[in-house]
C-alpha cells in the first residue's frame, strides 16, 4: 500500500501522447475536426492535474472545466493530507470526524471493500509506516495498521487510538472519476483527465482513442509501453518515484501485513472502468505480486493489467491494449 510521500514528490509519471494537454497554469485552445480542444492544469492532491475537453462550443468546454476544477478543489478540501484543515487531516489528528462529507464516506467504504477483497494488501491505515522511511517497523507501529478498525457510516468516521490513514492509493483516481462526471454533465463527450491517474472519454482531437505512454520504471525519460484508453481509466504504481534505497528494494509502496516494500515488481499498470478502481487495484496487485495479483484481477471483469518485474520481464493480461 502507498504511504504518503511529501507534496513535492509525484507518485507516478506518465507521458500523455496526442492529448493536447499543457503543463502551465493556463488554458490552451485549438480547433480540429470541428471541435475546440481546451486544456487546463492546476496543483491538487500532491500532483499536477491536467484536464482536456473537446467540444464544438469553446465556451461550453471552458465552463465544463471550470466546474470540474471547482469540484476538484472541494475534493482536496476533504481528502488532502497536505491541508491541515481538510477533513482527512482532522480525522487523523482527532481520531473521529462527525458529519463527514459524502464523498469521503464513499471513498472509505470502497477502500474497506478493496481491503477485504485483497486480503489486506490494500490498506489505507499504512500512514504511520511512512515516518519510518522504509526501516523495519516495530510491533507498536504495526499494531496501528488495520483497515478493519476504520469505522465508517454517514454520521461519523472513527479510527482506533494512534491510527492515521492516507488516501494516496485511491484519492487521485476518485478525483479523476468525479471530475469526468462533472464534465460529462456539462455536455463534454470527449475528454482526458490526468490526476496522477488517467480517465478518458470519447476520442482525442485526431478522432482516435486517447493514447498514453507508461513510464519505464528504470529509465526516467522513456516509456515501457504504449496503451490506448477507450472509455477506460489507467493507473500505475511503481517503486521508482519515492525510493529509500539505490536498488529500489525499499520505497513508498508498503505491504500492510509486513511493513516492508514488496520485492517482486517494479511497476503495475491497471486499466479499469473507473480510475478509483484502477488506482486501488494497481496498489493491491503490486503488494500481492504477480501470481496472486492476477488472481485478484479475475474478480474484476473488463479490467486489464501490465506488470513489470524488477528483472525487466513484462506480464500482461490477454486483453491489455498495447498501442503501436
Image: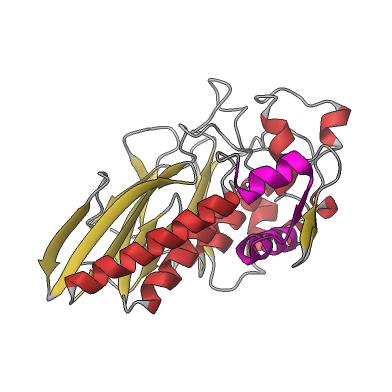
Residue 182's place in the image compared with 76, above or below, is: below
Of 154 and 235, the residue lying toward us: 154
Please check the rendered image and state whether residue 10 is part of the magenta-colored stretch, yes or no: no
Image x and y of residue 291, in percent: 67, 52
Scheme of image coloration: secondary structure
Residue plotted at (35% across, 43% down): 223
Of 205 and 186, the residue lying toward us: 186
Residue plotted at (73% across, 63% down): 113
Q: Quadrant of the N terminus?
A: top right
Write down the quadrant of residue 218 in the picture. Answer: top left
Q: Main secondary structure of the magenta part?
A: helix
Judge left or right: residue 294 versus residue 54: right
Of 225 and 203, the residue lying toward us: 203
Work out whether residue 76 can be spotted.
yes
Image x and y of residue 122, in percent: 70, 51
Write down the quadrant of residue 67 in the picture. Answer: bottom left
Residue 209's place in the image compared with 25, above or below, is: below
Residue 312's place in the image compared with 169, above or below, is: above
Work out whether residue 305 can be spotted.
no
Residue 36's place in the image compared with 242, above or below, is: below
Image x and y of residue 173, in percent: 51, 57
Judge left or right: residue 183 versus residue 80: left
Q: Quadrant of the C terminus?
A: bottom left
Judge left or right: residue 114 versus residue 9: right
Of 258 and 95, the residue lying toward us: 95
Q: Which residues are magenta?
A: 85-113
Residue plotted at (69% across, 44% down): 90
Image x and y of residue 66, in percent: 33, 63
Amino acid at each position: 500500500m502507498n504511504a504518503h510521500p511529501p507534496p513535492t514528490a509525484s507518485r507516478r509519471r506518465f507521458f500523455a501522447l496526442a492529448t493536447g494537454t499543457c503543463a502551465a497554469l493556463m488554458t490552451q485552445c485549438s480547433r480540429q475536426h470541428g471541435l475546440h480542444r481546451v486544456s487546463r492544469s492546476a496543483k491538487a492532491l500532491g500532483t499536477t492535474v491536467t484536464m482536456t475537453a473537446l467540444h464544438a462550443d469553446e465556451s461550453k468546454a471552458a465552463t465544463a472545466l471550470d466546474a470540474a476544477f471547482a469540484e476538484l478543489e472541494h475534493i482536496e478540501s476533504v481528502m488532502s493530507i497536505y491541508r491541515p484543515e481538510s477533513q482527512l487531516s482532522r480525522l487523523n489528528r482527532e481520531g473521529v470526524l462527525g458529519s463527514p462529507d459524502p464523498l469521503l464516506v464513499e471513498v472509505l467504504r470502497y477502500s474497506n471493500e478493496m481491503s477485504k477483497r485483497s486480503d489486506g494488501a490494500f490498506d489505507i491505515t499504512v500512514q504511520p509506516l511512512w515516518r519510518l522511511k522504509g526501516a523495519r517497523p516495530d510491533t507498536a507501529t504495526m499494531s496501528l495498521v488495520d483497515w478493519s478498525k476504520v469505522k465508517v457510516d454517514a454520521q461519523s468516521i472513527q479510527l482506533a487510538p494512534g491510527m492515521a490513514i492516507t488516501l494516496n492509493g485511491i484519492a487521485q483516481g476518485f478525483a479523476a472519476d468525479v471530475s469526468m462526471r462533472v464534465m460529462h454533465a456539462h455536455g463534454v463527450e470527449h475528454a482526458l483527465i490526468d490526476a496522477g491517474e488517467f480517465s478518458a472519454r470519447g476520442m482525442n482531437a485526431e478522432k482516435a482513442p486517447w493514447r498514453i505512454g507508461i513510464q519505464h520504471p528504470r529509465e526516467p525519460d522513456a516509456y515501457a509501453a504504449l496503451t490506448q484508453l477507450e472509455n477506460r481509466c489507467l493507473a500505475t504504481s511503481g517503486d521508482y518515484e519515492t525510493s529509500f534505497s539505490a536498488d529500489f528494494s525499499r520505497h513508498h509502496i508498503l505491504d500492510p501485513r509486513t511493513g516492508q516494500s514488496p520485492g517482486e515488481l517494479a511497476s503495475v499498470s491497471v486499466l479499469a472502468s473507473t480510475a478509483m478502481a484502477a488506482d486501488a487495484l494497481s496498489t493491491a496487485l503490486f503488494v500481492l505480486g504477480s501470481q496472486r495479483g492476477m488472481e485478484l484481477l479475475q474478480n474484476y471483469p473488463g479490467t486489464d493489467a501490465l506488470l513489470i518485474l524488477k528483472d525487466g520481464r513484462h506480464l500482461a493480461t490477454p486483453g491489455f491494449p498495447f498501442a503501436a
